[in-house]
Image: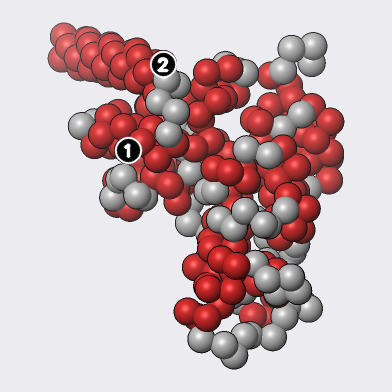
Amino acid sequence: MDHAIGLRLDSTFQAYLLACRRLRTERKADRVLDLLVGVLDPTLRLHRFGEHLRSRSVEETAWTFARLLARVAEGDVRARQIGFGLLDRGRLEQVLSSAHLTTAAEALRRRGHPGAALFADAPRRGPEAEDGVLPRPTEPIGYRISLARRAIAGAVERLLFDPDPRVVRALLGNPRVTEAEVVKLAASRRADPQALAIVAQDDRWIARYPVKVALANNPATPVRIALGLLPYLMRQDLRALSASDPRGEVRSQASALLQRQPGS
């Protein structure tokens, strides 16, 4: 009996220590978040966030992600201002190892946290799934990138759906490309998921609400990106996704966010 009581006491003490450690981690995450809001350059902000995470264990990284996700979902203005740029796997891989991210996502998954899906890898779509896709270009990649940077009239249409992500990235950086053209790419089901991820990682375009809505509604968009966009959508758009989106994870998360909003 004494041995059993000792085991329970030890278990309770370990749980208490773990709770204290998590609380400290979340408080540090809050302080870092408040500092990052004042960093105007998105790239510098991401690297500062990476510095913070590299000094944390995998478990603490998972808690930090969960804390930031909770603040975004609760409508915290400061968290929403910078959250999407910090919680995208494609961006985070610039400042953290893939192994660290994968293990942190697994820690979230073990606890049943919906944020784990934000860090999953999405496979590229195979040619057989691309109905109506444009023929593969015959020009050299260097020529197509040069063309994308110039955005010559008549070339934008096919460059939007170029199979090489470097061409799409160059095109998005061209000041002549319009919002309507980017929305067309973001909404297209024939677009390659990698190209859609590049749109989501472009700070100039993802700041525009129509681009967010188009990406979130596109079944070709990697699920992790669609889930990351949901907290930034208006109520009517969340309602539409919760009612009819073909992706179960997106439907359930949209419904959960609707229930957490005031007045629900």
The spot of residue 62 in percent (x, y) is 37, 33
Task: Check disc 1 and report its element: helix, strand or loop.
Answer: helix
As shown in the figure, which amino acid type bears the numbered disc 1? His
- The residue sitting at 69% across, 86% down in the picture is 135
Residue 212 position, x and y percent, is: 69, 42
Q: Is residue 254 above or below residue 123?
A: above
Whether the residues at callouts 1 and 2 have beta carbons within 8 Å, the answer is no
Identify the residue at image location x=76%, y=29%. 234
In the rendered image, the quadrant that contains the N terminus is: top left
Q: Where is mark 2, residue-wise? A: 34
Q: Position of residue 260 (x, y in %)?
A: 69, 19
Vertical order, 134 against 56 (above or below): below
Image quadrant in which you'd find residue 61:
top left
User: Is there any visible trace of residue 4 in the rendered image?
Assistant: no
- Drawn side of residue 66 relative to residue 94, left or right: right
Left or right side of 241 for 34? left
Q: CA distance from mark 1 to mark 2?
A: 15 Å
Look at 52% across and 18% down and name the residue there: 78
Q: Amino acid at mark 2?
A: Asp
Which residue in the structure is indicated by mark 1?
47
Q: Between residues 137 and 65, which one lies in front from this camera angle?
A: 137
